Amino acid sequence: MSGAYDRSVQPVEPGNELMPDRLVMHLRLTLLAVGLSSAACGTALTAQGGGPAGRNAGALAAVAQVMALRRDALGDPLQFDACTVFEKTGRPSGFPAGLPPGLVPLLDRTGSDPCAAAQPDSAARFPRIVRVDSVTVTGSGASVHLSIKRGEWSYNEDYFFAALPDGRGWGFREARITHPFRITPPPPR
C-alpha cells in the first residue's frame, strides 16, 4: 500500500480531547446547524457600510459575529489575540468599546491599544489562542479568516457572511475549517 494516506489516530493527550478528526466533524455539524437556524431566524450582522469608517465598523461587527458563533454555537471559549482583532479591524478608536460587552472577555488583553501590552501566552511552549488573519468587507458580504492554535495543534477557520436584502446587514453563510495538523517542536536541549 505505498503512497496510501495513513488515517491512523494518534494517542489523545490531555487538553486535546477533540483533536484532530472529531473537532473538525464537530465544527462542521455545529456550523451547519447554526447556518440553518441563522437563515431561518434572520440573524444578521448589523454594521454594513461604505467608506473607511463603515468598513472598519463592518470589520469589527464581522469579527464580533465570529466570536459569538465560536462561543455560543461551538461552545468554544478560546481567547482571541486582541492585537490581531485590533489591527485587522482597522485599529478602531475606543477599542474594545465597539464589541458587545459579553464578547470582551474573549480577548486575551484589553485597552485602547492591545498591541502595546505583551501577549499573556507569549512565553508558552504551546499557546492556545485564536488569531485574526484577515477581515474583508464589501457591499455584498464579509469574510473573516482565523488561525487557531490549541497547544500543539493548529488549524484555520474561514467564516463567510452574505448581504441581506434592503441593507439589513449580513447573515451567516458558511464556515470552512481546515484539517488540523500537529506541530512537533524539537526536543529540549
Image (spheres, grey):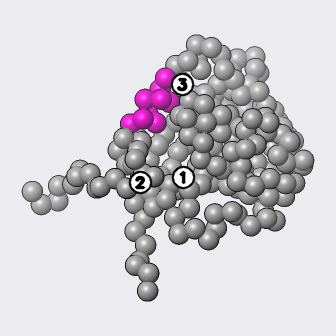
Q: Quick check: marks 1 and 3 in contact, CB under 8 Å? A: no
Most extreme residue toward the front is: 14
- Which of the two discs, 1 and 2, labels the residue nearer the N terminus? 2
Name the one closer to the observer, 19 or 148.
19
Q: Residue at x 86, y 42 (%)?
A: 97
* The N terminus - image quarter: bottom left
* Residue 102 picture location, percent across and down: 75, 35
Mark 1 → mark 3, Cα distance in angstroms: 20 Å
Residue nearest the observer in this picture, 77 or 167: 77
What is the C-alpha distance between the residues marked 1 and 2?
18 Å
Q: Secondary structure at mark 3?
A: helix
Left or right relative to 166: residue 132: left
- The part of the image, by quadrant, that contains residue 140 is top right
Magenta residues span: 25-34
Residue 34: mark in rendering: 3
Task: Report if residue 133 is visible in the image.
Answer: no
On screen, 110 above or below 63? below
Give the residue type that dot 3 points to: Val
The tag on residue 19 is none
Residue at which label 2 appears: 14
Mark 2 or mark 3, whichever is nearer to me: 2
171 and 100: which one is in front?
A: 100
Mark 1 or mark 3, earlier in chain: 3
